[in-house]
Structure formats: C-alpha cells, structure tokens
Image: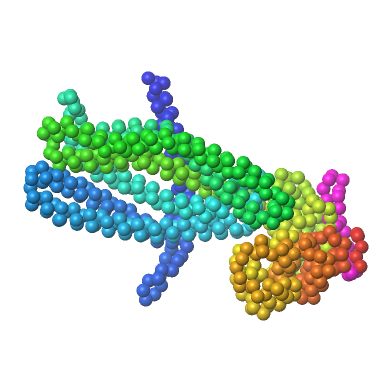
Amino acid sequence: MPSLASSYCGRLGNFMRRVKSLVLPVWRLAYPYFTATDTVSLPVPLRPMRIQERWIALGLASLIFGIELFKVTATVRLSYFNRDWFDAIQNKDEGAFWSQLLHVFLVWSLIYVTLSVSQYVIMSVLQIRWRTWMTKGYVDRWLGDHTHYRIGLLSSPGDNPDQRIAEDIDKFTRTTQSLTVQFLSSVSNLISFSVILWSISASFTVPGTNWHVPGFLVWGAVIYVGFITWLTHVIGRALVGLNFHQQRREADFRFSLARLREYGEQVSLLGGGEAEKDGLIRGRFKPLVKNFYAIINVRKRLMAFIVGYEQAATVIPYIFSATYYFSGQITLGTLTQVADAFLRLQMTLSFFITNYTDLTAYKAEVDRLTSFGEDMDRADAIRALAAPVVAAGDSRALSVRGLALKLPDGRRIASVPDLLLHPGEAVLLKGPSGSGKSTLFRAIAGIWPFCEGRVQIPAGATLLLLPQRPYIPIGSLRYAATYPQVLVRHGGDEIDRALRLARLPHLIERLDEEAAWAQTLTLGEQQRLAIARALLAKPDWLFLDEATAALDEPTEAALYTMLREQLPATTLVSIGHRATLQGFHERCLDMRPSSDGTFTLANARRQATAGALSEP
C-alpha cells in the first residue's frame, strides 16, 4: 500500500508539473497585455477619449465572460424546457406542448443566438487588438537596438522568428481566448448541471442494490470521465513534441524555398538545380514527411479512442438512468433532462479529452513564443557582457581607444589601440581577408557585441554604413532609394538627381514601381542605388565596406570623385582591395598580422598626400 500511494503521489506530482509548465508560460505571455498602460484614442462621439489599453482589454474580457455566463443560464433554462416538453408529450398535453415551444423554447433560443453572435464579435475585436499589441511589442523588441542581428550571432539561435511573429502570435491570442472561454463555460456548466443531476439523483440507489449514494449520477459521470481522460493522455501525450517539431520543419522548408527564390540566379549559374532538389526534398521535406507520419500514427489511435468515446456518450446517460425510468422513479421528461444534464456534465468534464489535440498544438505555440523571447533575452545579455562603450563626445573627430575585436566564441581577431578619424577626410582601410576590417566597422556602428574598448562619436553626428551587398526592401523603388529614412520625405527632383549622380538615370521612370528589386537589379545597380541613398542621407560619417566591389574601375573612380564633390563635409572611410582606391583617400590604414595570430591596426595616425599614397 505505501508503494501504491507513493506511485500515485508521484504521478500526481508529474501531472501538476506538466500543468504548471503550460500555465506559467501562458500567464507570462498574456499578463503584459492585460496590464498594458499604452494610451489609445477611442472614436467617441463629440470628443475622442483617451484610455489605457488594459482597460479596453479587461472590459472586453469581462463582457465575453459575462455573456458566457448568460449563455450557460440559457442552456440550463432550455434543459428545464426539455423536461417539461417531453412530459407534455408523455401526458399528451397539447396546450402545454405548444406553450413550451412558443413561449419558452423560441424566446430562450433567440436569446442564446443573440448572445453567441455578440460574443463572437467581441472576441474577434479583443483577439485582433491583443494580436496587434503583441506583434508591435515583439517587432519593437526584435528590431530595436539590433537585437535581430545579435540573435543570429547566438550559438544556437531559435528558428524562424518571422513565423513566431506572423503566425504564432496570431494562433496564441486566438487559442488562448478560445480555450479560456471554453474552460469558463465548462466550469459554469459543471456547477449548474451538477446541481440538476444531484437534485434528481439525491434519493437514487446503485442499480441492483439497496446502497443509497447521494448524487449517484454526478459521481458516475466524474469517475467515468476521469478514467477516460487518463487514457486520452496516455495515448496522445507524444503529440506535444511531434507538433513542435512539425511546425519547425514546416518553417525550415518554407525558408529554404524563399531563399532559393532569392538566390535563383546564382543557383542557375552554378548549375545547382540538382543539388538544391536533393537538399530540399531529402534534407528538408523528407524529415517533415517522416514527422507528419509519426503524428498520424499517434492521432489515429487518439482519434479512434475519442470518436468511440463520443459515440458512447450518446447512450451512456440513458444506460445510467434507464433503471430509474423503468421502475417509475422518474418521468420521460426527467429522463431526457437527466440524459441532457449527464451529457453536458460529461462534455464539461471531457474538456481535456475533446481539446487534447488543440492543447498539444497550443503547447507547441507557447513553447515557440517563449523560446523566441528567451533568444532575445540572450541577445541582450551578450551585448551587456562585452561590448565597446559607444559614447557621444565633444570632439569633432571620431576616436577609437583600446578596442579588442573578438569572435562569438571569445577568440580575439584584431586590436585597434588608437584610431582618430577627422571630419571631412577620406581614409582607406586595408588588410587580408579575415583581419577584422568589417568587424571594426560593425563595432563603430555599435552592433558588434564581442569586443571591448571605447568608441567616441561626435555628439549629434550621423553614421551610414554601406555593405558590399546592400539591403533592398520590398516596396517601390522610391522607398528603396530613400531607405532607411522612413520618416523623411525627399522631393522628386532630389531623388531624380541622386539617381543620375549614381549613374542610374534609367531607373527614374520606375520610381513608383513595386517589384522584387533585390532580384531585378544587378549587384552593380544595387551598389549604385546604395550610393544614391548616401547622397540623399548626407551623413557626417560614411563607411563603405567594399561597397563598389561589383563596379568596373572607371565607374568606381567616377562615383568616388562624385562623392567627394557632393559630400565635402562627410568623412569617408572605405574598405577595399583595389590599388586604384588609394588615389581617392588621403590616409591609408593597414591591418597587420601579429605574432599571436591576430591583427593590429598599424600607422593609424599616418598622414599621406592625397592622390599619391603608398603602402604604409
């Protein structure tokens, strides 16, 4: 007996831990919205009203719950209609038959339909407001302070943040709301119909015996459904992990297809069609299919059990109460009421059974959102561990002091003991591939967290970094040309002039055309479009990380000459390997190898004659 008791306690403890592992993450995800202090404007007649989002959320939730309680009340009243109506049929009382139908059933059915439609509308409004608030919060955090970039630097980053934001937030808000309302309905029905069943079976004895068990039908329903619930969990518990992995494999497959579309030209030039087919089908799709078959195997057993249970549910109430009807203890109307109440109590207690598949999918959604939040926490943590102090200074020069550049695993790449960049000068940064040149740019821009030292930028100065492969956003070419200045509106003449100076006059007529410009434009055109952005932005500091490497030398020379003429006050810092670039820079810096295998920035203060630089 002690071992049996300890085994039962152990199983109960495991069950409570599983419940806690679902409820606590849901609470952490849902609580912030219902306590949100964001102020919104409501279009109230005569004068708009400002109110905090939490009061809207709590108000809508209260209406939903209140309506659900009224729906349960209507259901209980219809249960008594069912009893009285069938009693009228048994007694052949035509007047009572039509009176119950017209004065009770139609009225309460109309009330129930009105409540259901109103609840649907309110739930839809709450769901979209909740999703909007969560989506904005996740996007703000993901894109704020370069978190999205640092997540990619983690040793084991989570998969597909786009799916977390676009799909899982939507599913989470919708499913949380639906399951909560269903749970509230189940609790209300449990109380209401337990009272009905208890009052009817208060004097019943166990069939075939003289044992008097108060509320026999209630205890019968609880024991029966409890046993079925335990069997359901045993059969279907593997679905939690399988659903999580299925969503991940689906997202990986979609991402691979989207990436192939983006790099379609490169794949074609390399003749990589067969390799891509092998990677897509064998590497991505087959694991998806294998996991899907595993889900089928579990769900077919679970479905067979649940469908069988639901079929049995239609006759079980009558089996439990038939003895009392045939013995004359209850009327036909009471028998139907007992059957209806028992069935509803059974459905209420079967909340876990009927929603088991949805709950397993819901658990996977909650886990993915939780892990996404944890990834952003880790990304914030690595910035705090070792990052340069980027500060605004009184000096007009940009200075770097004691900077140590490292890889994510902690290995040192390069050192920059002392660097001073003066306003308006042009500086060329050279060095072997892998010597930390691009990483130095990232550190100055404040996005590379794996470094130590100090970077001081003149107060109020603006920086713009042009990488070798520019980012071309989805939208019109006008939007792509002015990106990332989303709050600045340039005149049409200004944009036209920038495109002409960047040697892209043929694109002027297509400014308002929306297309996949990253696939439409050549890499050289994309680099020239980035130069046009710099002309529009007029930054104080312009960093070009091999930003003209795809251009021929005459075009590159013309663009550098144009930049110096059009942006005379801008400090120009370039990374490049072509010897011709030296003629367009007044100073040359060099990343030189050290004895310990790292690189050090040498001759950082050396001045040279413009147009006649030599290797330092």
Residue 541, image quadrant: bottom right
Q: Residue 599 magenta-drawn? A: yes
Could you tell me if residue 74 is visible in this image?
yes
Name which residue lies at 55% across and 58% down.
139
Instruction: Give the residue drawn at x 49%, y 44%.
Output: 364
**Residue at image location 52% in from the left, 59% down from the top:** 136
Quadrant placement of the N terminus: top left
Query: What colour scheme does the image use?
Result: rainbow
Residue 111: image x %, image y %?
Answer: 24, 57
In this rendering, the answer to whether 614 lies above or below 204 is below
Instruction: Report the front residue among 359 and 322.
Output: 322
Residue 538 visible in image: no
Image quadrant assignment for residue 351: top left
> From the viewer's perspective, is residue 119 above or below residue 318?
below
Residue 125, by quadrant, is: bottom left
| Residue at 83% from the left image edge and 66% from the top image edge | 553
Q: Position of residue 61 (x, y in %)?
A: 37, 56
Position of 568 compared to 235: left or right? right
Q: Is residue 407 left or right of residue 483?
A: right
Please provide percent x and percent y for residue 248: 55, 45
Reply above or below: 98 against 325.
below
In percent of width and height, residue 352 lies at 37, 40
**Residue 365 or 91: which is nearer the viewer?**
91
- Of 508 and 330, nearer the camera is 508
Looking at the rendering, the stretch of residues picked out in magenta corresponds to 590-611
Front residue of 460 and 557: 557
Q: Is 548 left, or right, of 371 in this rendering?
A: right
Quarter that holds the C terminus: bottom right
- Answer above or below: position of 348 versus 203: below
